[in-house]
Image (cartoon, rainbow, N blue to C red):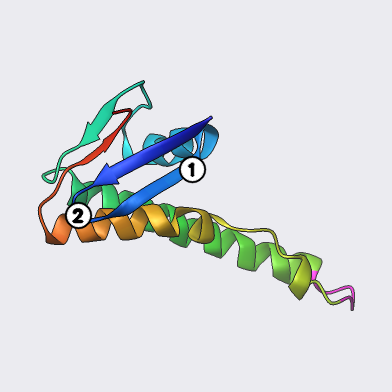
Amino acid sequence: MLITFKSSASPDVQMLENLAQYLLGIAGKSLGQRGVITHEELPVIIAKLEAAVSADKQNNAEHSLHHGADGHDHENQMPVGLAQRAFPFLEMLRDSEKLQANILWGI
């Protein structure tokens, strides 16, 4: 199922339910039928997601070092990481923080 996040500060962001649940879990929120991220919560949530993205990048880099030493070109085989998956949502969060707008879903 697709989840649509809405904010007056940016275009809508749609993602699959499992990704939405994962990102909101990192943020300390749970995915219900309806929900809100208030503009007051945004700085903490942005920091948590950015930390998770950094950790994921570090893990991917370490994985590449250990598994790329076999002489094969693995550059084109890299899986999509959290940074790519979370980017549209993080941009929405940042835009909403700038304009002090809430983010809603399930409406």
| Region rendered in magenta | 68-72
Marks 1/2: CA distance? 18 Å
Would residue 28 be found to the left or right of residue 42 on screen? Answer: right
Magenta stretch: residue 94 in it?
A: no
Q: Which residue is mark 1?
A: 15
Report the magenta stretch's main SS.
loop
Q: Amino acid at mark 1?
A: Met
Res 103 quadrant in image: top left
Q: Which residue is mark 2?
A: 96
Q: Please, what secondary structure does the residue beneath circle 1 have?
A: strand
Q: Please, what secondary structure does the residue beneath circle 2 have?
A: helix
Q: Earlier in the sequence, mark 1 or mark 2?
A: 1
Pick the residue in front: 17 or 61: 17
Q: Amino acid at mark 2?
A: Ser
Task: Please determine whether, in this image, residue 27 is positioned above or below residue 10.
Answer: above
Pick the residue in front: 14 or 69: 14
